[in-house]
Amino acid sequence: MRTVTIGLLGCGTVGQAVLQLLQRREAIFADLGVQLSVCGVLVRDLTQARDVPAGTPFTGDPAFLGECSIVVELMGGVDRPLGLLAPVLRSKRPVVTANKAMLAERWDTLREYALGGQLYYESAVMAGTPIIGPMSTVLRASRFVRLQAVLNGTCAYILSQMESGKPYVQALAEAQALGYAETPPTLDVGGFDTAHKLAVLARFCADGDFRYGDVKVTGIEGVTLDDIAAAKAAGEKIKLVATLERDGDGWRAEVAPTRLPDSHPICTAGEGRNAMVYQGEECGELVFAGGGAGGLVTASAVVGDIMDCVLGFPGHVPLH
């Protein structure tokens, strides 16, 4: 039995769920000959109550990162987590992260570590619905043609509420009350969260150096009840859709409110669920759908990445 030390950056909804799930899966790790030890959890407020296993070592001092075999980053943001992770990556230790914004916006710094198999980030896109794994492995044998995806649960919820007759302002307020949308909600409703995720996906199927700034972004703030009604009359629904397809010698990457037929797989995936239609020349059309947010849903992918790391599988390697 070998001991693997884990350090967590952040302990919000997902971080708490990760600690709970690690405790639940102790027997599975033991079968692998591994005993996990959480050596530190970095938080801003040490007094905040959290639903975690007894004895969880909370701290405001990141010094414990020097002792960790694996670091799990769940704090969000861009430059602060990157600053904490940089020494870990330089020391050739693995990092598990759900941080699509950091991955999208600081790829120039992170790409070499991803190519080296040090970065594990299945949970960064579609949470517990596995898409990065297939795109980084078996789907490489099929020439990529196009993808369309709904990647933000907040926008999916708001648009579904508008379909029932609620104006945008009311639907947004309800989403915020339920904890689906942040305050301010610009990252979600402005389409930027979806754009982050699309940039991450593009590096597995289009261009390993794909730039976040090359995604054209339009949010859902301008969608009206009249737009929803017009789509419905035509047998369609409006979704915030991420699209990636070839455009001449390059790629067109766009996030925008889009009218789709009611029968489209993205529309039939279910309310509040993320969905993606992936097209390859040889594999044909593939549909991925499932929960794209939530504590345990996201934690399942994070802990799965930890298991892969413990077993010696490399992280998610982009196109060379």
Image (cartoon, helix red, strand yellow):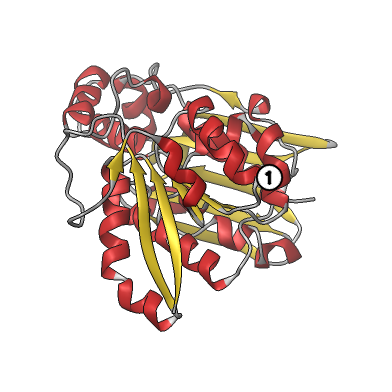
Relative to residue 192, is residue 56 drawn left or right?
A: left
Identify residue for label 1: 203
Say which of 77 and 266 sits in front: 77
* Rendered position, 99 above or below 162: below
Say which of 37 and 99 sits in front: 37
Relative to residue 155, is residue 67 drawn left or right?
A: right
Q: How many marks?
A: 1
If the image is split into quadrants, where does the N terminus sit?
Answer: bottom left
Residue at figure coordinates x 63%, y 31% from the top left: 106
The image shows residue 75 at horizontal and vertical percentages of: 39, 36
Q: Quadrant of residue 44?
A: top left
Say which of 146 and 7 sits in front: 7
The image shows residue 276 at horizontal and vertical percentages of: 50, 51
**Residue at the limit of the structure toward the bottom, as seen here:** 31
Which class describes the residues within 10 Å of circle 1: few (<14), some (14-19), or many (20+)? many
The image shows residue 27 at horizontal and vertical percentages of: 32, 78
* Rendered position, 21 above or below 1: above
Q: In which quarter of the image is residue 168?
A: top left
Residue at figure coordinates x 55%, y 30% from the top left: 83
Residue at figure coordinates x 45%, y 28% from the top left: 77
Residue at figure coordinates x 62%, y 45% from the top left: 89
**Residue at the limit of the structure toward the right, as seen here:** 249
The image shows residue 85 at horizontal and vertical percentages of: 55, 39
Q: Can residue 148 be seen in this view?
A: yes
| Residue type for callout 1 | Arg
Q: Is mark 1 on a helix, strand or loop?
A: helix
